[in-house]
């Protein structure tokens, strides 16, 4: 082998190593849970839509209220994984849809988190007393106690 061949192979190995190193340090983003889009929520009419209408428009949730008929909760979060660092939660949202005793939509609300506090991002309600806000705060707060293994599905 000539000196020129060895130099080319070395340069190729160096370029390949640099590309692998750069790929290993790129952040990986993962979404967990499900939160309906605003255009899907717009199909739900407060005071008219029923549980079946909600299920058809946005699907059934993974979380429901503790009391029968109190509401459906959709929870989603976005995580950033970067190399050997622990995962970082970038965003989390909860959509709460509550129903009357007759099963008609009473409230549709979207909650987010800002500086560790639960904030209302959007709200369509038929009455002012919001039921289940404590439950939403528990849902929002529980995401901070998720281990890296749970996030990575291990």
Image (cartoon, rainbow, N blue to C red):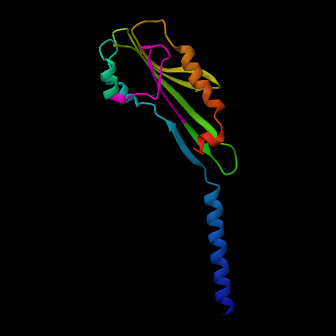
Identity of the residue drawn at 33% across and 9% down: 102
Q: Give residue 143's position: percent from left, percent from top.
A: 61, 30
Identity of the residue drawn at 31% across and 28% down: 56
Label count reads: 0
* Quarter of the picture holding the C terminus: top right
User: Would you identify the image quadrant in which residue 1 lies?
Assistant: bottom right
Q: Is residue 78 above or below residue 96?
A: below
Camera-nearest residue between 55 and 8? 55
Q: Is residue 80 above or below residue 21?
A: above
Magenta residues, as a range? 57-77
Identity of the residue drawn at 41% across and 30% down: 36
Task: Locate residue 8 relative to residue 45 in the image: left or right.
Answer: right
Q: Give residue 38's position: percent from left, percent from top.
A: 39, 28
Find out whether residue 30 is within the magenta segment.
no
Q: Give residue 77's position: percent from left, percent from top.
A: 54, 34
Find out whether residue 65 is within the magenta segment.
yes
């Amino acid at each position: 082998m000539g000196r020129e061949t060895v130099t080319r192979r070395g340069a190729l190995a160096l370029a390949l190593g640099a590309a692998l190193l750069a790929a290993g340090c790129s952040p990986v983003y993962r979404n967990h849970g499900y939160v309906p889009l605003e255009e899907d929520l717009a199909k739900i009419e407060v005071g008219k839509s029923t549980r079946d209408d909600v299920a058809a428009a946005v699907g059934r949730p993974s979380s429901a209220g503790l009391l029968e008929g109190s509401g459906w909760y959709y929870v989603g979060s976005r995580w950033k994984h970067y190399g050997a660092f622990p995962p970082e939660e970038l965003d989390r949202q909860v959509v709460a849809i509550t129903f009357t005793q007759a099963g008609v939509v009473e409230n549709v609300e979207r909650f987010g988190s800002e500086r560790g506090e639960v904030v209302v991002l959007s709200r369509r309600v038929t009455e002012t007393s919001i039921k289940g806000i404590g439950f939403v705060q528990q849902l929002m707060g529980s995401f901070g106690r998720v281990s890296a293994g749970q996030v990575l599905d291990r």
